[in-house]
């Protein structure tokens, strides 16, 4: 697909939620309904629509259920139009959580990151306490639990990124609470014999948000690019969502850990220069590249699930065209350049 095909948000979301044969096959292999907890975030809506389209194309009677507070009711309306059943629920309310219907498969996307500073207690409650309560309620389901590459330490940019065998080294309370999410989930999964996969994601991108958009907008607006975190990993959101759905077939006890990102270690300076060429704007820089960065190695995921379908170069072209034509964005900066873990 060329950037000119993304005429609007609807066309973009249709592309993001287009199921591949592998996703359709994965849905055929699942028995029972799928519930997505945290379905109204940046990735949740298109993941839910992807699952629903795969179910429809497979001719299944499986229900796809999106659960969220849905503070923006338009998201629930959009999902309902797409065939996804929605339930408005504050999962931190224990009575409301217990009222949720059972489902055979759970994709857990609940978490809080930005605004952690000053609200550390709530961050820990949402990120590390809640997963245990959820697993207790859905103790007969299989899980895919979204985590983050932030649980890893900064590593030399020449080392190829952290593998699943790299010992965690979270920097800051957000990252520590995400590791807490994993540990609490694993504890109850072991105790209750619940199969699962923990996805350590680094970073999903599309045209309305993500590291690529952050850099492209900074270049176009004439702002200086901070080179402190001089290298990153990214993956097209549609590919990350496809991995999440297909990972349900890999769930095991104790939970399997799987890194999810693109295959490249990307120079932030080089990204800015590419966007500069595409946008006709000379990028400005501040600071210098560190010798280490927050980087993941997803070779295990590629071995099990194949490589991402959307290459980095294509995503860069699409983001540049989106920015150049002033299309809608979510206005949710990633703060990928943060090195001290304070979000």
Image: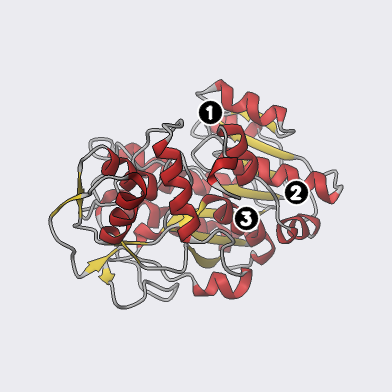
Disc 2: which residue: 54
**Residue 56 falls left or right of residue 13:** right
Report x, y in % for residue 289: 18, 63
For the residues bearing labels 1 and 2, Cβ distance under 8 angstroms: no
* Viewer-nearest residue: 246 or 50: 50
Classify the position of the C terminus by image quarter: top left
Q: List x then y, in percent, for residue 186.
A: 51, 61
- Identified at 65% across, 45% down, the residue is 17
Residue 154 point in image, percent of width and height: 27, 66
**Residue 334 in sight in this render:** no
Q: What residue does disc 3 label?
A: 242
Q: Which residue is mark 1?
A: 69
Left or right of 287 in this view: 60: right
Residue 7 falls left or right of residue 216: right
Secondary structure found at label 1 = loop
- Neighbour class for label 2 at 10 Å: few (<14), some, many (≥20)? many
User: Which of the two marks, 1 or 2, is nearer to us in this view?
Assistant: 2
Circle 3 or circle 1, nearest the eye:
3
Asked if one can make out residue 106 in the rendered structure from this viewpoint, the answer is yes
Residue at position x 79%, y 49% from top? Answer: 32
Name the residue: 52% across, 30% down: 90
**Image quadrant of residue 156?**
bottom left
């Amino acid at each position: 697909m060329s950037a000119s095909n993304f005429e609007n948000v609807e066309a973009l979301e249709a592309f993001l939620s287009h199921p591949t044969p592998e996703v359709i096959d994965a849905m055929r292999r699942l028995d029972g309904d799928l519930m997505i907890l945290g379905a109204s975030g940046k990735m949740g809506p298109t993941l839910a629509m992807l699952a629903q389209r795969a179910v429809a194309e497979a001719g299944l009677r499986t229900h796809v259920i999106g659960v969220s507070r849905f503070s923006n009711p338009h998201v629930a309306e959009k999902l309902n139009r797409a065939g996804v059943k929605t339930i408005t629920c504050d999962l931190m309310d224990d009575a409301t959580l217990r009222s949720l219907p059972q489902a055979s498969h759970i994709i857990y996307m609940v978490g809080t990151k930005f605004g952690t500073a000053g609200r550390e207690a709530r961050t820990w409650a949402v990120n590390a306490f809640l997963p245990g309560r959820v697993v207790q309620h859905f103790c007969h389901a299989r899980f895919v639990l979204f985590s983050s590459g932030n649980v890893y330490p900064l590593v030399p940019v020449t080392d190829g990124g952290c593998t699943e065998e790299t010992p965690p080294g979270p920097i800051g309370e957000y990252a520590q609470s995400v590791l807490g999410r994993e540990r609490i989930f694993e504890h109850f999964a072991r105790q209750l014999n619940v199969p699962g996969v923990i996805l350590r994601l680094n970073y999903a991108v599309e045209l309305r948000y993500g590291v690529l958009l952050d850099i492209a907008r900074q270049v176009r607006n004439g702002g200086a690019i901070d080179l402190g975190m001089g290298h990153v990993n990214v993956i097209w959101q549609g590919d990350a969502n496809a991995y999440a759905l297909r990972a349900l077939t890999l769930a095991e006890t104790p939970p399997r850990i799987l890194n999810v990102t693109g295959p490249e270690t990307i120079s932030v300076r080089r990204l800015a220069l590419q966007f500069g060429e595409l946008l006709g704007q000379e990028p400005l820089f501040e600071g210098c590249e560190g010798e280490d960065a927050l980087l993941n190695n997803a070779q295990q995921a590629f071995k099990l699930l194949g490589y991402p379908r959307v290459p980095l170069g294509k995503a860069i072209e699409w983001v540049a065209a989106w920015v150049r034509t002033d299309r809608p964005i979510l206005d949710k900066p990633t703060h990928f350049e943060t090195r001290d873990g304070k979000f």
